[in-house]
Image (cartoon, helix red, strand yellow):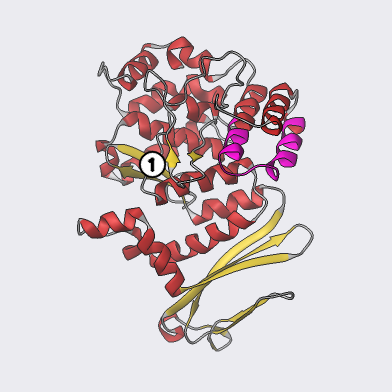
Amino acid sequence: MSQTLRNIQKSRQGVQSNVVPFPAMLEQFKGEIARALPKHLSPDRMVRIALTAFRMNPKLAQTDPRSVFAAVIQSSQLGLEVGLMGEAHLVPFGNQCQLIPGYQGLMKLARNSGIVQDIYGHEVRINDKFDIVLGLNRTLMHEPLKKNGFPASDEERGVIVGFYAVAVFKDGTRTFHALSKEQIEQVRDNSRGYQMAKKYGKESPWDTHFVPMGLKTVIRRLCNLLPKSPELAMALALDEVTERGENQNIGITEAIEGSWAPIIDEETGEIIQPTTESGDKGSKSDKAESPKGVEPHATGKLLQDTLAIIGRTATTDELDEVYVRAEGSFEGTELEQVLRAYRSRKSALANPSSSANDIFGEDGK
């Protein structure tokens, strides 16, 4: 393990020993993490887009560089580019960096699932023609106000009254979700990020980018109703943690393995932050019989059998098939455990000789 990685592991445990700045961290890690990145994304490209996003927000320099690095790797694992493309954003949260998927990123992941052919959303303004019918034969009609055959300006179309999103499946069928402006504002008002911004007299994205935030809200609601790939499920989970005002706590090891997933308390609905005796999130269980990435308190014969089958899969195709069959059988905490096991096994199958432990050694546990 390189000295840079040793320094990072020491600082994760509270020993501030030559903590490496984020730009230098990216350069020094480029060769060592190349094997852990998705094949479609080269280390050079990852470094460029990450540095651009980092420099566009000066406040990121005040956060822990390890959290920025982990967020970048997590974004790469999802196949989302941070920054100008709007697929994902690096956002300061106290002294930590959060990875927040944008609505463009959610749509990209939905399309990449292989189930959704297209997905899109629009705002509806008061002078537009809009109608929605629910029930057995659902329909949605939106005709923006026109001028000379083209959509009129936003000023002519009037104030926003709502948003909707549509998904088109491979077989040509469609589904949609619509929210009024009042419903969107209710979601906004319940957001911890928005509440804290108002409390301290600061601007939030809801104040400066209401239309993109409204679109993201309705697209996120639609995505929650769609069959989800593990990547889309992960992005939605990251966004949910942020909406709750919780720290994502993405560990570097988890980011490289692609094994991060929150655990939701089914009774309280709160995010449970798993920790170990050393306080390092994402450590392996002390029980040898527990599959890597699986919570030791997993209960239920069906769950245990499913986790065991995931651990025995020999190819990614076989693994994907097991996950798709299992997804509909679990919910809440159990589904999160299945997702953890899936991503951990997928990482091991894709990189049999380059797991996170190869990079971090025993200190990286």
- At a point 70% along the width and 45% down the height, the residue shown is 328
Quarter of the image where one finds residue 150? bottom right
Question: Which residues are drawn in magenta?
Answer: 318-340
From the top left corner, tell me how far across and down residue 134 is, in percent.
66, 76
Residue 215, image x, y percentages:
49, 64
Q: Quadrant of residue 58?
A: top left
One can see residue 361 in this view: yes
**Residue toward you, 31 or 192:** 192
- Compared to 176, does 279 lie above or below? above
Residue 338 lies in the magenta-colored region: yes
> Which element carries disc 1, helix, strand or loop?
strand
Is 308 situated left or right of 125 in this image?
right
Q: Quick check: 282 above or below 142? A: above
**Counting other residues with Cα less than 10 Å from the Cα at mark 1, is it few (<14), some (14-19), or many (20 or more)?**
many
Residue closest to the far right: 171
220 lies left or right of 206:
right
Residue 202 seen: no
364 left or right, relative to 13: right
Pick the front one: 34 or 221: 221
Residue that mark 1 sits on:
98
Q: Where is residue 141 in the image (x, y as percent from the top left)?
A: 63, 80
Q: Identify the residue at horizontal 29%, vertical 40% (top origin).
A: 60
Q: At 32% across and 65% down in the image, what residue appears?
A: 207
Query: Which is the main secondary structure of the residues drawn in magenta?
Result: helix
Q: Which residue is drawn at 40% across and 83% down?
A: 155
Residue type (three-letter) at the residue carrying disc 1: Gln
Q: Is residue 213 magenta?
A: no
